[in-house]
Amino acid sequence: MIYFCAMKQRRTLALTSALNGIDYLEASADGKHLTLVLLKAPTTAMPAPTATQVFISGGETITGITVTGIAPVSGQPLALTITLDETGDYAPYTLSLQASATTTAPPPQFDPALSSVVFRFHAGFDASVDCQNVVCCPPTLAAEPDINYLAKDFPAFQQVMLDRLAVLVPSWNEPHAADIGNTLVEILAYAADHLSYRQDAVATEAYLGTARSRISLRRHARLVDYTVNEGSNACTFVHFDLRDTRTAALPQGTPIQVPQGTTILPRVIGVLAQIDPSSSQFATLALASPAVFATMAAATLVPEQNVMPFYTWNDEACCLPAGATSATLAGSFTSLAANTVLLFEEVLGPDTGVPGDADPSHRWSVRLVSANVGTDPLNNQPITNIAWDPADALPFTLCITSSAEAAAGMAISVARGNMVPADHGQTQGPEILGPVPAPPPTPIAIGGAGCGGATAAPVAPPPFFFPSLAASPLTFARSYNPSQPASSLAASPVAATITLTDNLNATWSLESDLLTSGESDMDFVAEIENDGTAWLRFGDGTYGQAPAQGQTFAARYRSGNGSAGNVGADTLGIVGLAPSSLPPPITGVRNPIAATGGVDGDNMATIRTLAPFAFRTQLRAVTEADYAAVALRDTRIADARGTLRWTGSWRTAFVTIDPASNAPANLATATQATLETMRMAGTDVVVEGASLVGLHISLLVTVAPSYQRTAVRQALSAVFSTGLQPNGQPGLLDPAQFTFGASVYLSPFIAAAQDIDGVAAVQCQAFQRVDSPQTDYAAQGAIPLARLEIARVDNDPNRPDLGSLTIDMEGGW
């Protein structure tokens, strides 16, 4: 490193005089040699300093460094090489030229001001840096004013300004709020408070973990491809009970038209079922109602569908079994057709015949696929044969007639028509939004002409227009398809229910975001804040069209969303329908089944939890487990296994699937198409069914002496079945009880048999694989299966390869 003497002007004067001095000092990397460069070359009249005239002082851990030699540098007349006895430490040292060790005066002909230099040196230091000691006079720092920099709100800013004024202008002490000084302080404090809030908001809303606005979280989540769930409204089927208006002129009764969007309110004691929607009474009820529903489709109601009894073909103690998809009604119901929704309802207790004992859970809606009117050839009674969608198969056994029916004088269960879908949400609007304010001032372009000699024109910013809807929450409603199964009503797709038109009668389109919108696309986005308020965001002229200054909008939408609409059964009871010239024909309105499907939107904690991981969905299947996981994304597949094999020329991923009970016949083809989009390059995909292994199980059941063998056998058959047991649980032989590679144990079969009343003992006579009858696993108590094998005990005489169960009985009577 090179160290200069700091006195530059003194050096200049010394060069023009008869005095010599130190120009600079250079320390070598080895730490034991210094190069001293003088202002002038030594002469006889101005000799160079000797080794006894060079002194090194300073240091902390290494002191007393001695000069062992000094010699001129060849080719450099101004330079002298100084050799030291040891290197120094990291502390500063001073090299001084002195006439002798007993005096501090410099040698003859040397300037006293230029006879010493401060430097640092040690072994291994970086000698490539030219360091110069700069001596300067630092300015005197003024004392900072005593200001509270923690002030963040209006009162704190106001107090800070008043305290500062008390120091700067001690004579000013005006207590009146209307004083010009106090007014200016309040204006500045307000501006500071607003700026402080904006600074905090920008920093806070910039991160997913600190944002306090749900809209900010929604936008952050969109950046990582997570779509925030805005929730959905609840829906149900509403039954209309009609007054029988059949007359001689109208023998079939007068049909009633119910338009789509007809309002339905919860029942209120003492209020009629049908009220004019334009009346003040209806407006009051709607305003106070916790949940307002509306019909999802137009409907035609006929009195004959009020109550439709089942036809039992002159039998008694009849029921519709679980899984039923067809029935017969007593009567000629010509108004029934495909896509008509019916309600099956238990109206009397099967054992008592009392309405209060009817099971409210024995209510089920079905969508008809056919309705054929005919007659019973035995007695010429009119009947109507109905069949409904298999997806609406009866989930429970419905009792139709019993011994209690005769005493009650009516059927235990009936069918009802006049079922209309309805969902949660109240119609609002038109609500006027706007006018759009003027855009902020256009920034002034700074700078000269560009390369072409023209100055770039400043771009005018769009107006800030971010209106909110008065009613909340915005309804995300379900679409109704009359051909869909009745049981899937709550599974339909949802979308926000809002229509926006401007003052030019142009309709703007609702989008989930504006990233794909062009500069002329009239699109907008509805963003839901944490309090449920819906804010509408428009384009900026690049992503979506920006609204023009002075433009107004009319919003028509529905409010009501989430789990608040999941009302219980028989909650609804009032319809807003204008009466006709006849007496009010609707005598009752109710929802026999509880409303379902109402889901609350993602809260802020949910967004923070799910959004950072949503983008990690694997888009390519690599391992065997990946292929199985992709197949299992289809809910129609109960289980799947993937296997990678080398087929001689390339690798093939064999995906073995176990279809669920409701799987279609073409499931393997659909799965193959899905996996083709996910497979690795150079890997083929083959979808195959599981290897089904039939089991043969033979049990010897000893019946207790006081029990009848026939009754015990019937109970055993109910437990060892492939369908549902009487308690609604799956039977032990249900295919869903077995899965890939799962060993089948004998103990559950023995325990289930012994748990039946009347069974004294159970003994296993055979426990074998159908394809390997020579091996009996009764002693081991378990039949092991390979990885891709699934056990089956269908007990179907037509398919003995799929397993069988035999039960031999002894004892009892």
Image: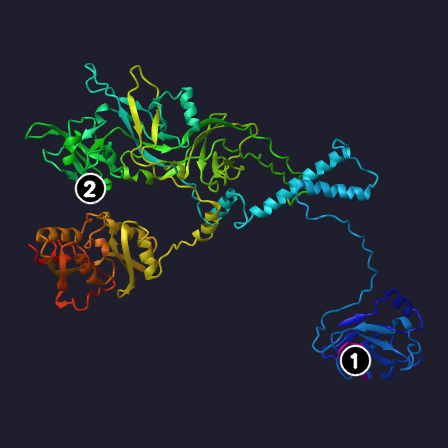
Give the magenta part as a residue range. 58-68
Residue 692 appears in the picture as rendered: no
Q: Position of residue 611 (x, y in %)?
A: 46, 50
Q: Position of residue 36 (x, y in %)?
A: 82, 76
Q: What amino acid type is highlighted by mark number 2? A: Thr
- Residue underneath mark 2: 397
Q: Nearer the viewer, residue 507 or 491?
A: 491
395 displayed left or right of 774:
right
Q: Nearer the viewer, residue 148 or 405?
A: 405
- Residue underneath mark 1: 63
- Seen in the picture, residue 574 relative to 809 is either above or below; the reply is above
- Seen in the picture, residue 702 relative to 120 is either above or below; the reply is above
What SS does tag 1 mark? loop
Determine crowd level at label 2: few under 14, some 14-19, many 20+ residues with C-alpha closer than 10 A. some
Q: Position of residue 115 (x, y in %)?
A: 87, 74
Q: Position of residue 589 (x, y in %)?
A: 31, 27
Q: What amino acid type is highlighted by mark number 1? A: Thr
Residue depicted at 11% across the width and 36% down the height:
316
Q: Quadrant of the N terminus?
A: bottom right
Q: Quadrant of the C terminus?
A: bottom left
Q: Is residue 62 highlighted in magenta?
A: yes
Find residue 141 and report its image quarter: bottom right
74 displayed left or right of 197:
right
- Seen in the picture, residue 550 relative to 785 is either above or below; the reply is above
Determine crowd level at label 1: few under 14, some 14-19, many 20+ residues with C-alpha closer than 10 A. some
Q: Is residue 711 highlighted in magenta?
A: no
Residue depicted at 80% across the width and 80% down the height:
81
- Seen in the picture, residue 112 relative to 407 is either above or below; the reply is below
Q: Nearer the viewer, residue 590 or 625?
A: 590
538 displayed left or right of 587:
right
Q: Which mark is residue 168?
A: none
Tell me how far mark 2 sits from mark 1, CA to CA.
105 Å
